[in-house]
Image: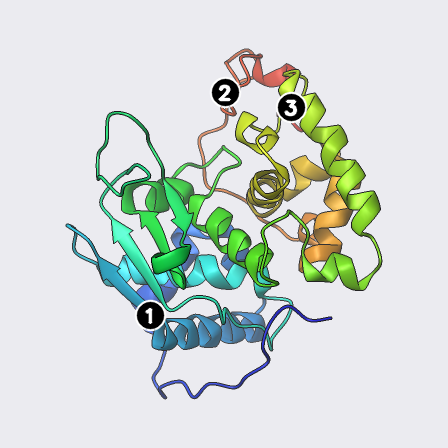
Amino acid sequence: MCFFRKKKRKAQDIEFPQAWKDLLIEYLPFYRSLGPEEKKQFEKRVLRFLNTTKITGIKTTVEDEDRVLIGASAIVPIFAFPAWEYHNLREVLLYPKHFDENHTIGSKSKAILGMVGYGYMEGKMILSKYSLWHGYKNKTDKQNTAIHEFVHLLDKADGKMDGVLGTIEERGLVLPWIKLMDENIKEIRKHKSDIRDYGGTSHEEFLAVVSEYFFERPKLLEKKHPVLYEYMELMFGQELADRELVKKAKPTQHWEPCPCDSGKKFRNCCSTD
């Protein structure tokens, strides 16, 4: 069972601008880790996404740099599957900052950073421009809002969001995956996990949060949660711990607070030494 429509779409025959390549090299370790031919395939798929998905700014201007990061965020989770496309997405709405369930930008009552639409918003995604860039500028955390929302679209592709992707269903691993999710959600709710609290909300949020972790800090996920890491490899068809996904960052000293906001010292939390 494949949860994507395998449909070829004609993309405009244009070159991937050097400025866009430089942007991805600067902000996307995943792209930097690719070989020359893989980079070309990644660029081609980003172009195809941008040629078939409308990106609209709401009270903000959509710059080329915004478009490239959104396109890259879409391709990262599906890069191992060349035929896959987001058939359940027509438009990305880019807000300048957080919003609430009524789409009030800058709301003081609630701060939503991204969401996929339902009902009259079906086929649309909303992203906060601030959180889009924060996901790539922050060099040490395990979060990326745009990737989080694209994983929700993958989850939703079979008509429901339940934290189970089609690649797990195809392997007959649904029940053990659900059991693993439940075990980890309990740990999160007891504050005994370095997976951020939002992952303890539900199965669908657990999947999206752990997927962020997988694509942002794969080696750390493999070290702290080896079984989860194995499932992520199966879901996305990528062995990221073997890639050199090095983030350009000022090293955190062992005695300093851990950047993941766990409240622990770095040496007792996310340090890989």
| Residue 123 position in % (x across, y down) | 40, 64
Q: Residue at x 72, y 61 (%)?
A: 167
Q: Tell me the CA gap for discs 1 and 3.
A: 42 Å
Q: Which residue is mark 3?
A: 188
- For mark 1, does the 10 Å Cα neighbourhood hold few (<14), some (14 to 19), or many (20 or more) residues? few
Q: Residue at x 57, y 71 (%)?
A: 38
- For mark 2, does the 10 Å Cα neighbourhood hold few (<14), some (14 to 19), or many (20 or more) residues? few
Marks 1/3 in contact by CB < 8 Å: the verdict is no
> Looking at the rendering, in which quadrant would you find the N terminus?
bottom right
User: SS for tag 1?
Assistant: helix
Q: Residue at x 41, y 42 (%)?
A: 135
Q: Is residue 96 left or right of residue 247?
A: left
Among the two numbered marks 1 and 3 on one chain, the one whose residue lies closer to the N terminus: 1
User: SS for tag 2?
Assistant: loop
Q: How many marks?
A: 3
Disc 3 marks a residue whose amino acid type is Ile
User: SS for tag 3?
Assistant: helix
Camera-side residue of 131 and 256 = 131
Q: Residue at x 48, y 74 (%)?
A: 45
Q: Which residue is mark 2?
A: 261
Vertical position of residue 109 compared to residue 100: above or below: above
Vertical position of residue 60 compared to residue 171: above or below: above
Q: Tell me the CA gap for discs 2 and 1.
A: 36 Å
Q: Nearer the viewer, mark 1 or mark 3?
A: 3
Q: Which residue is mark 1?
A: 18
